[in-house]
Image (tube, rainbow, N blue to C red):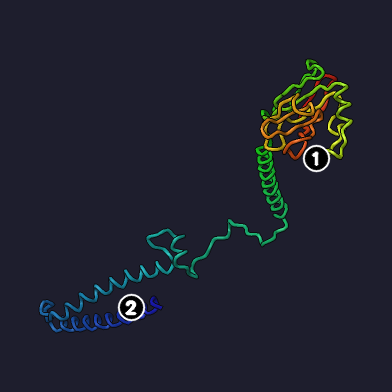
Amino acid sequence: MLRVAGRRLFSVSQRSSTNATTSFVLSRDHSLSHGHDSRSLPSSDLSRFASYHRSLLRGFSSQVLTQGNEVGFGSEPATVEAVKTPNSKIVYDDHNHERYPPGDPSKRAFAYFVLSGGRFVYASVLRLLVLKLIVSMSASKDVLALASLEVDLGSIEPGTTVTVKWRGKPVFIRRRTEDDIKLANSVDLGSLRDPQEDSVRVKNPEWLVVVGVCTHLGCIPLPNAGDYGGWFCPCHGSHYDISGRIRKGPAPYNLEVPTYSFLEENKLLIG
């Protein structure tokens, strides 16, 4: 709107200036034809002629700038001007550009390939992260080495008890005699606080393997002591028999039997 108004004002001023100049030129010619000197022209006519030339030059320059701005060229690059001042006269060259409609069948295979490849990469990264998390949560090699313990039983005499350390806890290994086995099997289960048969607590009747921690408050009982020939806890007076069962005192349960197996006749694996 402003551009159209400027054009109208420019045309009106140009017409007025042209009329004034025409009248000025006609009067000048008329005076010259009557023999008057140009130096005798009034000053108002001279100022009118000068203002006409200034307006004419200004009109030419503004017209050039206006035409240039309409096309979209200025001090900034053409692309910037086109974005700032869109115009219907701007025509894009599509000669070297090939446009495909959405969903072009010729590009479908490539699109599937790109999408499938991206999903495969995402799945691989996710799998790697899950494996890293699982490995970080698993036990290290030194911990796994301490999880099991091999014990040579060849040096243990019948009727004696050996204490070994497994996972930071003492483990009692007792090689029982025939009398010890008969005594353990002759106990009335009804008289026990934590009833268990001796055959349930051992894999080989000759060998008894129990964790050397009192079930009362976690003290370490003394082997080959107490009223029943097994273990005695001096802290609070708990007595265990030859099968590691609680017989007397405040302890509520029998001594714990760890997981173990016999690798050979005289080799024991705890854990």
- In the image, residue 60 sits, relative to residue 268, either above or below, namely below
For residue 98, say whether it is visible.
yes
Q: Position of residue 265 (x, y in %)?
A: 85, 20
Q: Tell which of 37 and 109 is nearer to you.
A: 109
On screen, residue 3 above or below 139:
below
| Disc 2/disc 1 C-alpha distance (Å) | 118 Å
Quick check: can you spot residue 167? no
Percent of width and height locating residue 225: 74, 25
Question: Splitting the image into 4 quarters, where does residue 170 fall?
Answer: top right
Q: Nearer the viewer, mark 2 or mark 1?
A: 1
Three-letter code for the amino acid on which mark 1 is drawn = Arg
Figure quadrant of the C terminus:
top right
Q: Quadrant of residue 129?
A: top right
Question: Is label 2 in a helix, a strand or a loop?
Answer: helix
In the rendered image, residue 160, in percent from the top left (x then y), is placed at 78, 19
**Which residue is at a point 89% across and 31% down the rendered structure image?**
186
Q: Which residue corresponds to the image point at 57% horizontal and 60% vertical from the top-left?
A: 94
Q: Amino acid at mark 2?
A: Phe
Q: What residue is disc 1 on?
A: 193
On the rendered structure, is 143 left or right of 25?
right
Q: Look at the picture and state if 121 lies above or below 86.
A: above
- Residue in front for this viewpoint, 151 or 181: 181
The residue carrying mark 2 is 10
Report crowding for label 2: few under 14, some 14 to 19, many 20 or more residues within 10 A (C-alpha): some
Q: SS for tag 1?
A: loop
